[in-house]
Amino acid sequence: MTDSRDNIYATPREAIDRFAFDDTVAAVFPDMIQRSVPGYSTIVAMTGVLADRYAKPGTRCYDLGCSLGASSFAMAQYLGERNCPIIAVDNSQAMLTRLSERLKDFPVTVEAVCDDIRNITIQDASVVVLNFTLQFLEPDTRDALLNTIYQGMVPGGVLVLSEKIRFADAHLQELNTDLHHAFKKANGYSDLEIAQKRSALENVLQPETIGTHEQRISDAGFGSVDVWFQCFNFASFVAIK
Ligand code: GEK
């Protein structure tokens, strides 16, 4: 299976279906996310660096909403000798099929699980990664997931949460939306592609403010929380149990 360039929304459509992580999306996913999310490569690479610092021998690392496993592979680079299995979870069978292909002959234990991240048991976790996944869950289910994650973590463990964010201030919301679109245009997406993708994601991707995320993380019990990376309307949080 080879990865292709994303031109899913390049031609005009009469009706735009709700965005779904199906085989069409999985086939272009690395190109799509790289050209759509400012800072994606940095966030994924630094997820590995954070895992290196916090992963404790004999505990587990979770990659929730793993897609093709980019964050798992970044963590695996550092965890080779540490006896820390990586559990990579996604509810898209199309993503998991491609991930399993990538894991053939891979030297580090990465267990690929096809399930809703709200259904799985999180246990003995020293690292939990939610890179651009929480934003796709119904907002009223997000608190419960964060609580489950906290309960399943060992003291001193790290949560990495990366999200598209929104701004309470209307001017900043407009500015950052425009800057994000400029970023996509600079990466080769046309106005039509940007507009059609935006319609497809309406009500599917529901961003929240930095304040809402920080409050939820604190309410779940995490002692320290910070935004360690932000570019326009994309941010990554680090939190320590
Ligand atoms: C990366 N982290 O490359 N349960 C499990 N998986 C889900 C759920 C759910 N309830 N909802 C959505 N997903 C990756 C990128 S992509 C981000 C993550 C993006 C999965 C969905 O199938 C998809 O693979 C992933 O979350 C989101 O760093 O496309 O913007």
Image (tube, rainbow, N blue to C red):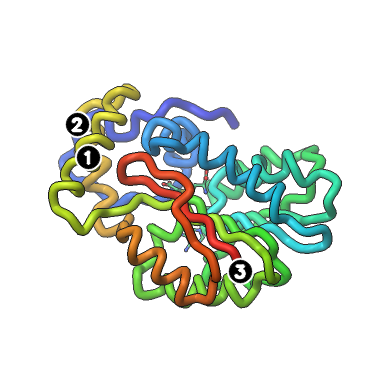
Eyeballing the image, is 121 above or below 21?
below
- Percent position (x, y) of residue 3? 53, 29
Give how far across and how far down residue 36 sits, in percent: 37, 36
Camera-nearest label, 1 or 3: 3
Identified at 58% across, 73% down, the residue is 150
Q: Residues within 10 Å of mark 1 (few under 14, many from 20)?
A: many
Residue highlighted by disc 2: 192
Q: Nearer the viewer, residue 71 or 231?
A: 231
Residue matched to label 1 = 196
What amino acid does circle 1 point to? Gln
Q: Secondary structure at mark 2?
A: helix
Residue 233, which numbered label?
none
From the viewer's perspective, is 170 left or right of 26?
A: left
| Callout 1–callout 2 Cβ contact below 8 Å | yes
Label 3 lies in ligand 1 vicinity (Cβ under 8 Å): no
**Percent position (x, y) of residue 220?**
50, 76
Sequence-wise, the earlier of marks 1 and 3 is 1
Q: Secondary structure at mark 1?
A: helix
Q: Which residue is mark 3?
A: 241
Q: Is residue 28 above or below residue 63?
A: above
Q: Earlier in the sequence, mark 3 or mark 2?
A: 2
Residue behind label 2 places its C-beta within 8 angstroms of ligand 1: no
Q: Amino acid at mark 2?
A: Leu
- Quarter of the image holding residue 168? bottom left
Q: Nearer the viewer, residue 117 or 175?
A: 175
- Residue 90 in sight: no
The picture places residue 61, in percent across and down from the top left corner, at 69, 58
